[in-house]
Amino acid sequence: MLFILVAISATFLTVVGLSNSLNTIISSQRAQVAADAGALSCVIYGQDAVERIVIENNAELISVISKASQCQVVAQFHGVSRDAYAMTSSDSRLPTLQR
């Protein structure tokens, strides 16, 4: 009988832990999508469009740093913050991390 109670308790704790981890992962991804969309809208439409785009993605805008052809946006979703960076280019060669 004791073994069954221990097994049920361990299963319950595992499910709760996985649920919390899953919620954090989902919040992280939602924050990243909002930050990405905000950064892209910043370089395409200007800094004024960022807040609307982030809010449409159900996130909170934390900060925007905008320069001539670059923009960095930090967005937060359920307490998880993520940032994104976007830039424009006048030629067809865009800098990437790929080699």
Image (tube, rainbow, N blue to C red):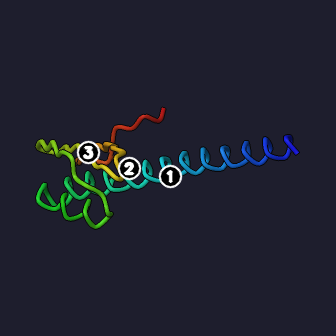
Identity, as a three-letter code, of the amino acid under mark 3: Val
User: Where is residue 67, by image quadrant?
Assistant: top left
Report helix, strand or loop for mark 3: strand
Closer to the N terminus: mark 1 or mark 3? 1
Q: Report the residue at 67% width, 44% height from top.
A: 14
Amino acid type of the residue tagged 2 in the rendering: Gln
Q: Earlier in the sequence, mark 1 or mark 2?
A: 1
Q: Residues within 10 Å of mark 3 (few under 14, many from 20)?
A: many
Instruction: Give the CA distance from mark 3 to mark 2.
Output: 9 Å
**Residue at x 48% of width, y 47% of height:** 24
Residue wearing tag 1: 23
Task: Using the image as rendered, state which of residue 5 and residue 16 is in the foreground.
Answer: 5
Taking the image as shown, residue 36 lies to the left or right of residue 99, namely left
Q: What secondary structure is marked by label 2?
A: helix
x, y percent for residue 46: 13, 57
Query: Label 3 near label 1: C-beta < 8 Å?
Result: no
Q: Which mark, by number, is residue 32?
A: 2
Residue 53, given in percent of the width and then of the height, sits at: 24, 63
Q: Nearer the viewer, residue 92 or 15?
A: 15
| Residue at x-position 88% and y-position 45% | 1
Number of marks in picture: 3
Q: Which residue lies under the disc numbered 3? A: 74
User: Can you tell which mark lies on residue 96?
Assistant: none
